[in-house]
Image (cartoon, rainbow, N blue to C red):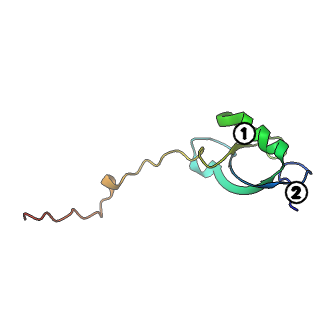
Amino acid sequence: MDRCAFCPRPATGKWALSACKGDAEDSASWRREILPLCPRCDALIMQAGDKGRVLKATGERWFGGHRVGRPQPKWTPAQDPNKEEPISASG
């Protein structure tokens, strides 16, 4: 049986988590992981919601799931200079 990633308790399953260390607006500060968690640590992280919980040992802020983190990209397909325009059927 796996051990919890945050404490010495046995983990009951693996969960999707996101971590931020540094500036939350910088995409390099974020990472995603699937980690084993005990029920207690899972509940604490989920209760924290969008605020997340800081792991004192590393200073990282952890969030449940992969729905938070990495800001939206500033690039859109319309900005691609190599994009070819579609050929119209009338032309």
Tell me the tag on residue 46.
1
User: Residue 48 appears in which quarter of the rendering?
Assistant: top right
Percent of width and height locating residue 8: 92, 51
Percent of width and height locating residue 21: 70, 45
Please name the residue that numbered disc 2 is placed on.
3
- In this view of the protein, can residue 59 be seen by the observer? no
- In this view of the protein, can residue 71 be seen by the observer? yes
Left or right of residue 86, residue 70 in this image:
right
Q: Nearer the viewer, residue 59 or 13?
A: 13
Q: Answer few, some or many: residues within 10 Å of disc 1's Cα (few below 14, many 20 plus, some between 14 and 19).
A: some
Gap in angstroms between the C-alphas marked 1 and 2: 19 Å
Left or right of residue 75, residue 21 in this image:
right
Give the position of the N terminus as an image quadrant: bottom right
User: Residue 83 appears in which quarter of the rendering?
Assistant: bottom left
Q: Residue at x 85, y 53 (%)?
A: 4
Identified by mark 1, the residue type is Met
Q: Residue at x 30, y 64 (%)?
A: 82
Q: Nearer the viewer, residue 28 or 44?
A: 44
Element class at badge 2: loop
Identified by mark 2, the residue type is Arg
